[in-house]
Amino acid sequence: MLSAPLSSLLWLAVILSLLSFFSTTLPFFAGAHWVPTPVSTVRRMLRLANVQPGETVYDLGSGDGRVLIIAAREFGARAVGVEIDPLKYLWTRAMIALLGLGDRVTVHRANFFDVGLRGADVITLYLLPKANARLLPKFERELKPGARVVAYAFALPAWPVVAEAKNVKVYCLPPQ
């Protein structure tokens, strides 16, 4: 029989192992594993999308929240993140609170295929091509005319590019 402290440590190790497992596998099946976008690229993405103060930026697969934080602090935007990974979600929530951005930044722990996007002026993506392609019908159903989608590294199929610089492409919702 294990002593109480050893038993507690064993349970803690099991819980942390499960969190780590889900933290790495859930994002992969949802659309991409996490690779942090360089801060200089985040700024380029938001500049190319011409984000204006008061607009709403959604980051699908928001990871550690860097897009959300920069959109709010440097561009004056409201920012909404969607992150399936529980650890990155908690990290982002902590950073939002620490930086005092709770009135302008929110993050949802969810699969981005299940979150409504009707309020978005700008969507940012760093997802694999298959996830980008799966999102197109959702964008066409839910985004308002004039909404911009900014993709880093992997293009959106079938939509014309309206701005481009160094592996960042901006698309505008085609007229319906």
Image (cartoon, grey):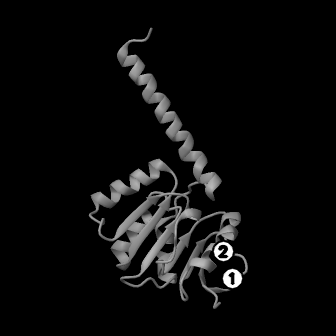
Which numbered circle lies on residue 90? none
Q: Is residue 80 above or below residue 17?
A: below
Q: Report helix, strand or loop for mark 2.
A: helix
Residues at marks 2 and 1, CA–CA distance in whole angstroms:
9 Å
Q: Closer to the camera, 69 or 108? A: 108
Whether residue 71 appears in this view of the structure is no
Instruction: Determine crowd level at label 1: few under 14, some 14-19, many 20+ residues with C-alpha closer than 10 A.
Output: few
Whether residue 118 appears in this view of the structure is yes
Rendering coords of residue 68 (x, y %): 42, 68
- The type of residue carrying mark 1 is Trp
The residue at which mark 1 appears reads as 159
Rendering coords of residue 113 (x, y %): 59, 64
Q: Quadrant of residue 2?
A: top left
Q: Report helix, strand or loop for mark 1.
A: loop
Q: Quadrant of the C terminus?
A: bottom right
Q: Does label 2 or label 1 sit earlier along the sequence?
A: 2
Q: Quadrant of residue 160?
A: bottom right
Rendering coords of residue 152 (x, y %): 59, 71
Residue sitting at the far bottom: 175
Could you tell me if the residues under marks 2 and 1 are in contact, i.e. CB atoms within 8 Å? yes
Residue sitting at the far top: 1
Q: Closer to the camera, 36 or 129? A: 129
The residue at which mark 2 appears reads as 136
Q: What residue lies at 52% left-to-right and 34% top-to-bottom?
A: 17
Number of the front mark, 2 or 1: 2
Instruction: Determine crowd level at label 2: few under 14, some 14-19, many 20+ residues with C-alpha closer than 10 A.
Output: some
- The type of residue carrying mark 2 is Leu
Q: Quadrant of residue 30?
A: bottom right
Residue 41 horizontal side relative to residue 4, left or right: right
